[in-house]
Structure formats: structure tokens, C-alpha cells
Image: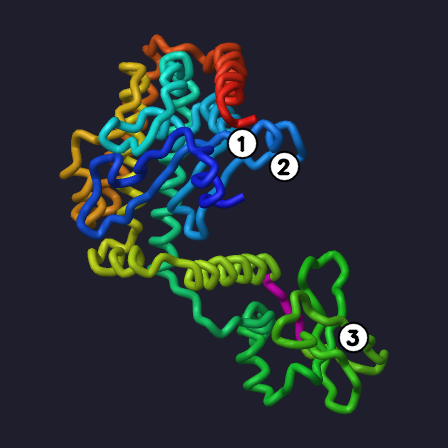
Amino acid sequence: MTIDYLKENNLIILECISGSKAYGLNTPTSDTDIKGVFILPKESYYSLNYVPQVSNQTNDIVYFELGRFMELLSVNNPNILELLNTPKSAILYKHPYLERIDSKKILSKLCKNTFGKFALSQIKKAKGLKKKIMNPIGKERKSILSFCYVNHNKGSISLIKYLELKKWKQEHCGLINISHMKDVYGLFYNENVEYKGIIKNDYSNDVSLSSIPKEEDMQTILYFNKDGYSKYCKEYKEYWNWVEKRNDDRYESTQSHGKNYDAKNMMHTFRLLEMAIEIGKDAEINVVRPNRNFLLDIKNGKFEYDDLLSKANKLQDKMTESFETSSLSETPDIDYINNLLFELREQFYSINLE
């Protein structure tokens, strides 16, 4: 199912401008994001062809099927609550039946977790980008040899340095386990014996063990920092996946303001925390943000990272307080949502969606 199919068959029942243009945070370079709701034809809904979501390739246009839309409302999903409460100026089309949805019967204290966790995820993303920018990982992948150390001159040196000093090749080395000593091995060397080497190749995930003739003398003890190697492999994969998939415009923006964190993520952290406070106090979703200049200053990197974290921590405390004294119910009215979904679908199917 495609967006064109939804439009050609008049299946879209809500279509809104979302993102920065809905929040009132757009700038001349902002893209136009679209979110909305569609309803499947009755035949598709009752068959095995249920489709919960339809989007374009870049995910800047997304439509949720009515059932999925209501399901996400029932868990107070921030994006879906924002969609339901889109300001009139950003609504492109809204079927009159949807006016029956009462946001006040859906909002609950769950928003403390959903909005709060969403906000914390933005901080995590900002931290993650800061770490990647400040700690780039070289394209050439390190092998296990870089994580091995040997006993030498009453101390230890890296295996690579040790092999250089000895003028040895790792292919002529043999290793054996040493009982009761995790990741510690006896190292042997003999160019005339067919040892398996320390590793089979540069992409090995563990050291190789060899059969050692009884007459061979152990040269030294080798320690393989296996945990360190595993951590490096994970970070290497994450870093180069990020490089491959990163949004170059946002990366350049981050580089240009020189603060070394994703300022857009930090802006959304504050937006979400402030919205959560308003929900707790007033039981309302205010999509358009009243402090545009402050939020855009965050996006433009005008604050230090630690200062923003301090401000965000204070907002978190304020959010917790607002929900402690809130008149909101603990959870949404699920019976109301279920009954409403049934009635709305029946109404739509009674028109022209048979």
C-alpha cells in the first residue's frame, strides 16, 4: 500500500503539517513534514492485509491506520498526542468524525514517562553524538593483536611491541591455555613447527590455540584483553554505521557551532520536558511553543552542553512535581478509546469504504 493509493481512494482522514512548522520552530531551511491518519477499506481491515502505517522512503511523510493511531493514543505516545492536538493552522484536512476524539479522556499521568523518556532519549542521542565527534575511530579496524600484552622485564608490554623486539612473526607463535587464569595463555615460538599462530587472520574474534611439543619451552605469558576487544568492535561498528547513515547537514551544523553535541536533539529535550510540565499542570497539549527564541538558541548552539544538562535536570524535577499534584488519571480511559474506535470505524464504513 502506498501514499498514492491512500490519496486516490480517499482513505486519508487526517493530514497535518508536523515537526518544526507545527511547533512554530521552523526556519527558512526547514523541511515540511507530514503526519496523518488513514482508514483501511473494510475488506482489507477484516482480512490478513492489515497495514498499520504507510510512509515515504525518507519517513518525512507518515500516515497511521485509525486502529494504530488509537492504540498509540492509548499509551500516550508523544508524537501521536501532538498529531491529535495539531493547531488548526497546520491541519491540511480533518474529517469531521474525528472531532469526537476528546483528548482530555486520553491524557494521563503516563505522559510523565512517555514524554520524559522521549526527552531523555534525546539527551542520550546528543551525548552519543558528542562522544562520536570527540572520539573518532580510525577506519582501519584493529585486530586482536592490538589487545594482547605479554610479560617482559618484570612488567608488561604490548604484544605488537614484543614481536618487533624479538623480530618474530605472529604466524610462528603457538598458544596454550593456562589453567585457572582467564584469557591468559602460554606463548611459544618456533619457525620450524607448524603452530596456528596467535590469530588466523585480522578479522578473528578469538586467539588460536596450538598443540605444543613437550620439548618446547614457553617464552612468556600472554594476556588477551577480550572484554576490551569486544567493546572496541561494538564501538567501531556503531561509529562507522553512524558515519555512513548520519545526516550530513545536521553534522555540519554541529561542527559549525563548535559545541560538539547535537543541538537539535537538545532543543527537542527542552520542548518535550516543557510540554510534559504543561500536561501535568493544565491537562493540555500545547504543540506551538511559546519560547521559540530560546529553543532556536539551543538549536543554534548558543549554550554550553553542561549548562543545558543542568537546566534539563531542573525541568525534570519540575515535571515530576507537576505530575505529583496533577488531577490527571493514572492511565487513559481505555473503555472510552475502545468504544470510540469501534463507533468511528462503523461510521466510516457506513459511508463509502465498503
Vertical side of 80 occupied by 104: above or below: above
Q: Measure the C-alpha gap from mark 2 to mark 1.
A: 9 Å
Q: Residue furthest front?
A: 352
Residue 254 seen by the camera: yes
Label the magenta part by its dominant secondary structure: strand
Q: Which mark is residue 49?
A: 2
Q: Measure the C-alpha gap from mark 3 to mark 1.
A: 63 Å
Q: Which mark is residue 291?
A: none
Identify the image quadrant of residue 257.
Answer: bottom left
Foreground pick, 150 / 110: 110
Q: Position of residue 277 (x, y in %)?
A: 29, 22
Magenta segment? 220-225
- List the residue tagged with mark 1: 40
Residue 274 seen by the camera: no
Identified at 32% across, 25% down, the residue is 85
The mark closer to the camera, 3 or 1, is: 1
Sequence-earlier tag: 3 or 1: 1
Q: Amino acid at mark 3?
A: Ser
Q: For numbered disc 1, what is the local secondary structure?
A: loop
Identified at 42% across, 51% down, the residue is 58
- List the residue tagged with mark 3: 210
Please state the total of marks drawn on the protein image. 3
Foreground pick, 192 / 12: 12
42 sits left or right of 251 in the view: right
Q: Residue furthest right?
A: 214
